[in-house]
Amino acid sequence: MSKEFNAFEMAQRQFDAVAEKLQLGEGMRELLRWPQREYHFTIPIKMDDGSVKVFKGFRVQHSDARGPCKGGIRFHPQETIDTVRALATWMTWKCAVVDIPLGGGKGGVICDPHDLSAREQEQICRNWVRQVARNIGPVQDVPAPDVMTNPQHMVWMMDEYEKITGGHFPGAITGKPVELGGSLGRTEATGYGVIYTVREALKRMNIPIKGIKASLQGFGNVAQYAAKLLIDLGGTVVAVSSWDNTDYKAYTFRNLEGIDVDFLLSITDRFGTVDKTKAAEAGYEVLDAEAWLEQDVEILIPAALENQVTGENAHKIHDNVKILSEGANGPTTPEADEILKEKGIFVIPDFLANAGGVTCSYFEQVQCNTNFFWPKEEVLERLDQKMTLAFHAVTDLAEETDEFMRDAAYMIAIQRVATACHLRGWA
């Protein structure tokens, strides 16, 4: 990630541009461009070797105007407070654009789970909760998994929260295993949601999904399930990329006949790192990190980290690309957006495209709070309905106003949050 890149500055720039279009008052702009609350804290952990190491943790609550804050917790060695601020801000817009009654939050710990034992990770989870237990919960702020955290981490956090509060509150944390209040369909939700929006975009372009080709950045949860569903619908994924923890580089794995998701999963570790030696032995081309962006496909899906499609590399995108659907948060910079506009590429913005995850997390929260759980088919059907309605609302506005899809999505989301703030008398 570029040292010059600041995700929060990008989030604010995106907000400022749309706030101007909406002619928001100065007070409302100032309220919505900054988080309502931030928690910074240290997490001392006794390591397996007997030493004590101190980690830095964060929780940012951007806005609770429309409901309790909602957002994941990242474990990442390059985590920064500005990244967490940006992600919390984007979560506010994400919840609003799909019209679920939640606000935006995000959390993180500066650490690398690759270098930590299960016991050390558990202690980080429990200590993180101890620092913010009074400020999170089912009616305040509901955490969930994010980069390099998983359902097991969420169980440890929920267990610690319940020990502190003295009751059972499965709706306090989402992304849990099904056995302890998780929702069926949650694992697939973000990746499936990305493809639901791609499917609808293709319909509006009168392009059949059968035979469509795609290239994906990343091979974590989002990319895996996006690839699976696209293939199930008749498409072909010719390339995916993967971060390699052994040499700290990314690689693109290409098979022009179409990747075999199950095979790649069989040689992928829990952090989404594909074994490049085994992939090459199976006939996959192992290319450089940015090769995924240059493929002759109709669909590009960045599903890794922020700041990946930039003013420096967006010109490498093939002329045949019709749709870029952002599975990751903040993968495309404003400079890249200008190039995508020139190329005529239809962009499905991150906080719409990848909103399937938070939507299903909302479903999990509802199910936990009512202690009544739905079949998987019902969860995915409700998810499809939510994503489809949100996609068409944004696309209709973009067409009516001749706005870029990202701006149209922001206009809907920001207006909904601003209305809630106004009705509450905040600004």
Image (cartoon, helix red, strand yellow):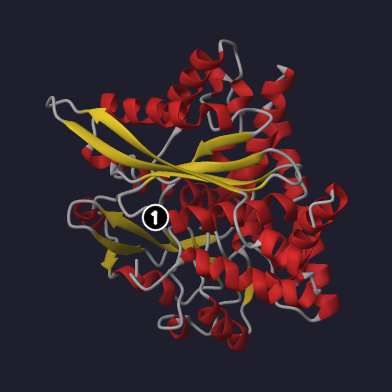
The image quadrant where one finds the C terminus is: bottom right
Left or right: 329 in relation to 355: left
Q: In percent of the image, x 54 and y 52: which residue is there?
A: 226
Q: Position of residue 5 (x, y in %)?
A: 41, 71
- Residue 407 drawn above or below residue 124: below
The image quadrant where one finds the N terminus is: bottom left
- Residue 307 drawn above or below residue 222: below
- Outermost residue, top direction? 166
Q: In percent of the image, x 51 and y 74: which residue is there?
A: 333
Left or right: 305 in relation to 136: left
Q: Position of residue 273 (x, y in %)?
A: 30, 49
Is residue 214 at all visible to an observer of this figure?
no
- Residue 397 drawn above or below residue 388: below
Comparing 132 with 213, the one in front is 132
For mark 1, what is the residue?
Answer: 80
The amino acid type of the residue labelled 1 equals Thr
Q: In percent of the image, x 48 and y 65: which residue is there?
A: 7
Q: In percent of the image, x 46 and y 82: which residue is there?
A: 311
Q: Position of residue 195 (x, y in %)?
A: 62, 55
Q: Position of residue 146 (x, y in %)?
A: 47, 44
Comparing 308 with 65, the one in front is 65
- Outermost residue, left direction? 49
